[in-house]
């Protein structure tokens, strides 16, 4: 069922908020997942990260596709307990053995989750410069364009042509909460604009760059959809733009390769401005390698670094996390 996913330390505050809003689903136990807590909710909410998850149930109506799907008994333990929802599209990661049952799984998801209209399986890893992955249609409409609601904004997305992860909603809100009114923001890897458009609500100007023409096409649509007039979409390699902008806040949401763009980020931030750096790190030492790299590049440029915050954003792979480091340079 639909769930709100929040970092553990914010769980109690958000539980009270969900109760206040009257959207916390009754009769289920909450669920813990890494450093996060999942609350079952009765309707989609704009300002929280939404995921699909199973909870210990108390009623008879099926709440999970796993209760209704027909697969060989020996494969049942392999059925994933959660999947992503982007707008009205579900994207599930199936192990190889379950792929022949893909249609049945897709149909079961459609049956139990009436707001979902199309189901796809992940066809591989997120790859290439554009950070997209192949999708395999399982059931429902064979359509990859949808409108996703998050943090009070609407995003039109083609899930087959651009990168988008609904699991970053909480992180995006965290960056928004740290932003000050009137800032100049530089979103170096903007995608369809989930950071840019959200931050446009506070910023004076947002420069939003992406290499993928489809991402910039949807970013432009989303600027219109959300009626913001202070986002400047730029199609191209961020290296061509960096250094020409002096921003108060720089967002480097390209965790796989952000380290390669640290110089560009540091040359594009005003003294004392904030850089939001993302990367991947092993559980046993999440930050050291990244922080050493940040220090080394700053030293080369004759700058000093102040680390402001660091955090786990989400689990990425077994014993690997997507991490964030906020820092400033002078
Ligand atoms: C991980 S996605 C993040 C997108 C967006 N910030 C979000 O949260 O959904 C990274 C994006 O960076 C873009 N990208 C990769 N290399 C780039 C480069 N050298 N210059 C500009 N954009 C680039 C990709 O096309 C992709 O859309």
Image (tube, helix red, strand yellow):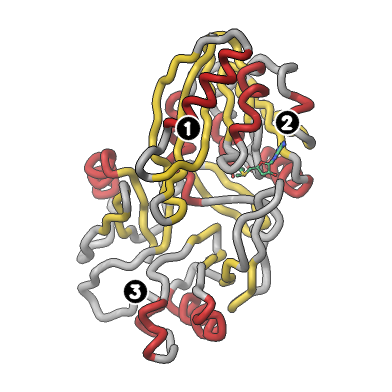
Instruction: Find residue 238 and name its label.
Output: 2
Dot 3 or dot 1, earlier in sequence: 3
Give the residue drawn at x 74%, y 17%: 244
Q: Residues within 10 Å of mark 2 (few under 14, many from 20)?
A: some
Left or right, residue 92 beside residue 233:
left
Residue under numbered circle 1: 289
Measured in 3D between alpha carbons, the distance from the residue under mark 3 to the one under mark 1, in whole angstroms, is 43 Å
Q: Quadrant for the C terminus, please.
A: top right
Cβ at disc 2 under 8 Å from ligand 1: yes
Residue 112, percent across and down? 42, 76
- Above-or-below relation of 240 to 102: above
Q: Quadrant for the N terminus, please.
A: bottom left
Give the residue drawn at x 60%, y 55%: 147
Q: Nearer the viewer, residue 319 or 182?
A: 319
Q: Residues within 10 Å of mark 1 (few under 14, many from 20)?
A: few
- Where is ligand 1, by quadrant? top right
Q: Nearer the viewer, residue 110 or 136?
A: 136
Residue 138, percent across and down? 59, 77
Query: Of circles 3 and 2, which is in front?
Result: 2
Residue 32, percent across and down? 27, 55
Residue under numbered circle 3: 63
């Amino acid at each position: 069922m639909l769930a709100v996913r929040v970092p553990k330390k914010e769980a109690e505050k958000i539980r009270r908020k969900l109760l206040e809003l009257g959207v916390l689903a009754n009769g289920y136990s909450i669920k813990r997942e890494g450093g996060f807590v999942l609350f079952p909710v009765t309707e989609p909410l704009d300002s929280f990260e939404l995921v699909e998850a199973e909870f210990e149930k108390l009623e008879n109506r099926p709440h999970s596709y796993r209760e209704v799907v027909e697969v060989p008994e020996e494969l049942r333990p392999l059925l994933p307990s959660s999947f992503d929802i982007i707008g009205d599209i579900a994207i599930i990661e199936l192990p190889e053995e379950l792929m022949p049952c893909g249609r049945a799984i897709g149909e079961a998801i459609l049956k139990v989750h009436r707001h979902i209209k199309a189901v796809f399986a992940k066809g591989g890893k997120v790859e290439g410069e554009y950070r997209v992955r192949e999708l395999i249609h399982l059931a429902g409409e064979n359509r990859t364009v949808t409108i996703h609601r998050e943090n009070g904004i609407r995003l039109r997305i083609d899930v087959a042509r651009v990168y988008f992860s609904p699991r970053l909603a909480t992180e995006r809100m965290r960056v928004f909460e740290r932003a000050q009114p009137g800032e100049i923001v530089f979103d170096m890897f903007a995608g369809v604009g989930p950071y840019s458009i959200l931050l446009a609500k506070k910023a004076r100007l947002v420069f939003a760059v992406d290499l993928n023409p489809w991402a910039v096409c949807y970013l432009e649509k989303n600027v219109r959809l959300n009626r913001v007039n202070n986002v400047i979409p730029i199609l191209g390699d961020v290296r061509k733009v960096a250094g020409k902008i002096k921003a108060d806040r720089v967002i480097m949401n390209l965790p796989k390769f952000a380290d390669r763009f640290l110089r560009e980020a540091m040359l594009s931030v005003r003294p004392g401005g904030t850089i939001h750096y993302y990367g991947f790190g092993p559980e046993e030492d999440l930050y050291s390698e990244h922080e050493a790299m940040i220090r080394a590049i700053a030293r080369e440029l004759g700058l000093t670094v102040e680390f402001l915050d660091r955090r786990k954003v989400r689990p990425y792979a077994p014993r690997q996390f997507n991490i964030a480091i906020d820092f400033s340079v002078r």
